Image: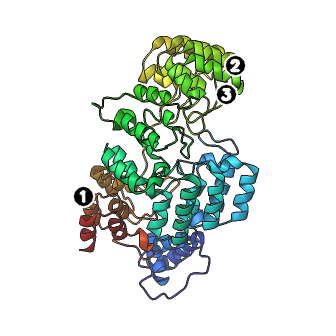
Amino acid sequence: MSLTPSRHLPERPSLEQLRKQAREHLDTLRAADPAVKLAAAQHALAREYGFESWPTLVHHVESLQPASRMLRPAALRSDDKLLWSPGRGTDLWALIQACISGDLDAVRALIARDPSLARAHYTYRKPLYFAVRENRVDIARFLLEHDHNPMDLWFDDSPLEIARDRGYVEMERLLTETLDAKFNASSKGEPIALALREHDLTRMRELLDAEPALLSKGDRLSNQPIHWATMTRQLEAIDELLQRGADIDARRMDGAQPIHLTNGDYFYRGWRDVPRDWPTSAAQVMAHLRSRGAIVDLPTACHTGDLDRVRELLRQDPSLANRVGAAGAPLANAAAAGRLDIVQLLLDHGADPNLPEEQIAPRGKALYEAVRSGHYEIAKLLLERGAFPNPPVESSGDALFVARELRPDARVEQLLLSYGATPVPEDPEEAWPAVAHNWMRITPLHEAARAGDLEKAKALLDAGADLTARDEHLRSTPLAWAAKFGQREMVTLLLERGAPRTLPDDPAWATPLAWAKKRGHEEIARLLQQ
């Protein structure tokens, strides 16, 4: 607020009331000049309240009501179970609102009624994200007690980065201590993780000699050295770690053991991150771990086609056929491997062809894998045994899409259609108007700023995009997004188009200059200081 106000906002200002006041003020102004526009009345009203413009007044009022700033998605207005997440839409929305407002009693009650809500999410944002974002320490502590894998879904920044960026000292302490003590995830394991990724066994040895406890210390995602030696396919490192006492079956917070990671994971992918000329294959690492005594669970036995091990495990416990592990679901793995005999055996032991894999395959993954891998007879058998005919898989389309587009196969396509598969119409290309936003109020201009897409930004600005729009994710303007993500040319463009370097009520941590400094973009920081 940079002007001396002639009137003051109430303790709980309402945008609806302010808009009504602006319309009333417009009637007064039009009595003298019928040509006066609403924008002029809004501007005059904002200045009476001490703000430079109507947008800055709106931003201020909205910032006082963080829970109501977000737009409620249709899926979270429904009592139906969510497709890609545990829980029901209305329950998850209520939990999100409770996390934002700091209502611990409501959080406890919702999770007592449905414990799966602690790990629920919408567009990859879990309840813990909102608790951290709003600095609700007690709620974050409670959620950390009820989510077995709190680091699996984060958007742009980790919880520790969010706390540090915003100066939440107590929250940062809670996260640091809990992730280390309960989940074995900390920065202490990062140096040895880096050494293994760089294939620097000399450095690995130096670190372990200096601090033997690092042998079992996880990195920020709880990967221990034995996990990284496996993902990077270094047999010598695996053996040395085992000689030093590493646990060949050590679990990460997501339950993954080394034998599940021979081809990497979501963040470190074997096909992408292991050098193409690396002499050791994933299969060789698997065989090496097995020769050293690693436990082979049912999903892994199905993945590798080990029929004897599958039989042994099913004899011990037939219920394993319907248990999803860190390596996925047994039936899906057997289908992907093309093992009709194992698929038949699992089905005969009661395997559900529609067994959900949480967050990945809500209607089961076995049929999708059979189609993707071109195993017609397996697909046919699964359909005969009741498989849903067009199962979707997260970020990977559905079975019919695979048969038509990804791996065209007219025979498989007709098979799926004969069992009632319904084609899913393609989502139309987003055609947002310049002022539209998603549920987090992230506008197309924000996204263009993140990506450094100058042509899209110009088109949006020409169409009237709001340079002062502030989202709920980073509480930042498009200029601040460009600064955070290191897009220097975008920063230049937005400044040339009149983007304010700050808004009167910007959080100190969310200004363009603050982001540039925090992310080490020195050239952008200098540009913003000119």
The answer to whether the residue labelled 1 contacts the one labelled 2, judged by CB atoms less than 8 Å apart, is no
Mark 2 Cα shell of 10 Å, populated few (<14), some (14-19), many (≥20): some
Quadrant where the N terminus lies? bottom left
Task: Give the mark nearest the N terminus, 2 or 3.
Answer: 3
Mark 1 Cα shell of 10 Å, populated few (<14), some (14-19), many (≥20): some
Towards the viewer: 24 or 101: 101
The answer to whether the residue labelled 1 contacts the one labelled 3, judged by CB atoms less than 8 Å apart, is no
The answer to which quarter of the image holds residue 157 is: bottom left
**Of labels 1 and 2, the one closer to you:** 2
The amino acid beneath tag 3 is: Leu
Quadrant where the C terminus lies? bottom left
Q: Which residue is mark 3?
A: 320
Mark 3 Cα shell of 10 Å, populated few (<14), some (14-19), many (≥20): many
Identify which residue is drawn at 57% across, 60% down.
178
Secondary structure, mark 3, is helix
Identify which residue is drawn at 34% across, 56% down.
449
Q: CA distance from mark 2 to mark 3?
A: 9 Å
Identify which residue is drawn at 67% across, 56% down.
94
Q: Which residue is mark 2?
A: 349
Secondary structure, mark 1, is helix
